[in-house]
Amino acid sequence: MSGAVIAIDGPAGSGKSTVARAVANALGWTFLDTGAMYRAVTVEALARGIELSDEEAVARLADSLVITNSPRVCVDGRDVQDDLRTERVNLAVSTVAANPAVRRVMVERQREFAQNQAVGTVVEGRDITTVVFPHATLKVYLTASLEQRAMRRGEEGAHSLSRRDVADTTREASPLRRAPDAHVIDTTSRPVDEVVQEIIECLKNLNSI
Ligand code: CDP
């Protein structure tokens, strides 16, 4: 299945990471959390005191960083996993992710990553079905009610979550959108296993055509 991609998009708290990881485990495929890449760049930009509105400086930084993710997210060999989901990063990440030059660097790396796997890859993010892998083997869009998404996120809170929703769906560079050919799953009140099974069924149906 080398080169095969299951692309999963959706807003914060829709279950993307949990579901994508579980699908990858069930299939024996690799998992890529692209949000963690934007978060890692944000952690580093904040640590270095780089002005986030200075698009060139942030893009130069993104280009220079070596980001690895197995088993924990590291930047230039330094473990930043525990810094990825702080409130400071939640507040800043959508600005970094709206930077078109940063996106160019990240998208290229994401495509390269999937190409280099001996097995298929499950990739999740905001622009995976629309920009990064528009010809993915299977495209999925996960959604859920704001109330349930905020509950799943606990500490981040509904206010910060909706702020990120607005920033991510209204930005000019690769906004979050449902690809017209994506399989849409509303995960509100649905157990993870059931959603995972639905995605695996979709994949099987594709393969049996
Ligand atoms: O898991 P959660 O939805 O909280 O966020 P994430 O997947 O870790 O992504 C964090 C932020 O990175 C999002 O709010 C987007 O601004 C950005 N992002 C993006 O623009 N494109 C992606 N492919 C993935 C994340």
Image: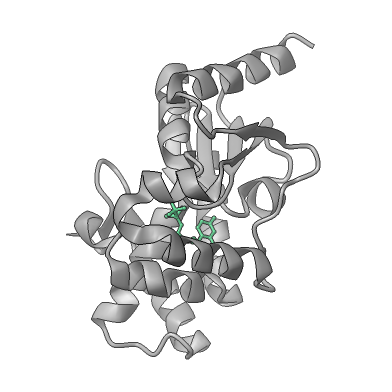
Q: Is residue 183 left or right of residue 36?
A: right
Q: Residue 205, relative to residue 136: is it above or below? A: above
State the residue in front, 44 or 165. Answer: 165
Residue 65 image point, x, y percent? 35, 68
Could you tell me residue 143's position as x and y percent? 59, 42
Determine which quarter of the picture holds residue 81: bottom left
Say if residue 65 shows up in the picture: no
* 17 or 157, nearer to the observer: 157
- Quarter assignment of residue 79: bottom left
For residue 76, above or below residue 9: below
Task: Give the residue at x 49% y 70%.
Answer: 94
Number of numbered markers = 0
Q: Quadrant of the N terminus?
A: top right
- Which quadrant is the C terminus positioned in? top right
The chosen color scheme is one colour
> Residue at position x 67%, y 45% from top?
129
Q: Can residue 198 be seen?
A: yes
- Which residue is rendered at x = 45% and y = 19% of the image? 193
- Report x, y in % for residue 120: 53, 28
Q: In the rendered view, does 104 fall on the left or right side of 190?
A: right
Query: Among all residues in the image, which is located at the extreme front?
Result: 147
Q: Is residue 117 above or below residue 192?
A: below
Instruction: Kindly identify the residue that appears in the image at 51 percent across and 43 percent down.
Output: 14
**Residue 185 at what x, y percent from top left?**
63, 32
